Amino acid sequence: MPIIEVQGLSKKFKTVSALQNLNLDVQTGEIFGIIGPDGAGKTTFLRILTGVLVPSSGKVNVCNVDVVRSPDFVKSKIGVVPQTFSLYPDLTVEENLNFFRKMYLIAESDFIKRKERLLKITRLGQFLNRRADQLSGGMQKKLALIACLLHTPELLLLDEPTTGVDPISRRELWDFLYDLYGQGTTIIISTPYMDEAERCSRVGFLYRGELLSVDTPSKVREKYPYKILEIKSKNNDLIRSLKFPMNLRVIDLRPAGQFLHLITDQYQPQATTDFLREQHVEFEMNLVEPTFEDAFIALIRQKKD
C-alpha cells in the first residue's frame, strides 16, 4: 500500500520551475532515495511532502492525508530531519528531548522507554548534559533523528542527513536507519551521494525538477545503455588528447583514478585497440561494469540529447 502518492506535482517560484509534473508512489516499508545534484529539486520535493510548501499544481497524499488540504495533520504522522540543524543550540541534549516530549504530548512512561532505546542505538546517552551546539556534526544529526522519532512516526523524511558528516558518523547514521527500516519504519532520504543511493530499496533520479527514472539500484545499472572500456596506461594525457575516429562512437573519455574510462554506444574492442596501437600507445584495456554514478550520468546525457 502506498504511503506516499504524488500525481502531476509541479512547483514554480516566479519564473523558475523547481518541480515539473512528478508522478510517484512510495510503498510502506521502503527506504526510498531521492537522488540528484544540487538544485535538482530534492529539498523542494521533501518540503511539499511535509506540508511546508504548497505545490503549484498536482495531488500529494502522505500517510492517507491530503497534504494540500491538511498540512498540519500530516505533521503528526511524520518525522522530519532537515538539512540544517534545527534544534535549540543553547539547550542540552536532555533539554531538547524533553521539549519535544511536551510538543508531541508523549506520556512520561512512553517517553522514557523510547528515549532510552534511541539513546542506546545512537550512543548519545553519555552526552545528555552537553549543549547541542557543542556536539559534533554527526552527533547533531543523531540528536535530530532521536527528536523526530520520539512520537514513533509512520514515515521518516531526511534531507541530505549525511552532508558534512565524517565517514564514521555517516556509516553509523546508516546503521541507525537500517535498524529503523528493520522495525518497519518507511524512510525517504535525499542525497547527492551515489554510494548511499545503492543502500536504498528504490531510487528516484531528480534532475532540474524532473523525475528521470524510478527503479531498484540493480535495475538502474542493468539499464545502462553504453559500454565502458577501462584503459590502464602510462600515457593518459596522450590518450585524452587523441581525436578518436567517428566509427568508434566514443561518447566520453574521463579519468577514473589511475585509469581512463572510455564510454561508447558500440562495443568495438578490437577497433579501439587497433587505433590506440596506431598512435603508439602502450596500454591494457578491459570491459568493466557501470557504477551507479555512471547510470545517473547516462540518464542526464539522454535527457540533454
Image: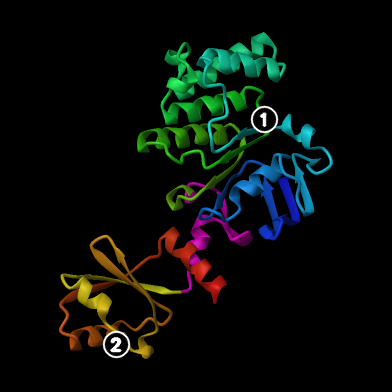
Q: Magenta includes 178?
A: no
Placement of the N terminus among the 4 image quadrants:
top right
Q: Is residue 240 placed above or below 6 in the rendered structure?
A: below
Q: Is residue 146 placed above or below 15 in the rendered structure?
A: above
Given the image, on which type of amino acid does mark 2 rest? Answer: Ala
Q: Magenta includes 201?
A: yes
Q: N-terminal of the two: label 2 or label 1?
A: 1
The residue at the point 62 percent across, 34 percent down is: 80
Q: Is residue 265 placed above or below 189 in the rendered structure?
A: below
Magenta part of the chain:
197-225
Residue 123 in sight here: no
For mark 2, give the secondary structure: helix
Tell whether 23 sits left or right of 38: right
Task: Specify the quadrant of the image occupied by residue 267.
Answer: bottom left
| Residue found at the far right of this picture | 69
Residue under label 2, please give it: 271
Badge 1: few (under 14), some or many (20 or more) residues near its Cα, within 10 Å? some
Residue 272 in sight here: yes
How many labels sit on residues?
2
The residue at the point 28 percent across, 69 percent down is: 260
Q: Nearer the viewer, residue 185 or 146?
A: 146
Placement of the C terminus among the 4 image quadrants:
bottom right
Residue 46, image x, y percentages = 64, 44
Given the image, on which type of amino acid does mark 1 rest? Answer: Pro
Residue under label 1, please give it: 153
Residue 81, image x, y percentages = 58, 34
Marks 2 and 1 sit apart, C-alpha to C-alpha, by 58 Å
Q: Nearer the viewer, residue 285 or 69?
A: 69
Tell whether 130 sits left or right of 30: left
For mark 1, give the secondary structure: loop
- What colour scheme does the image use? rainbow
Residue 158, image x, y percentages = 57, 39
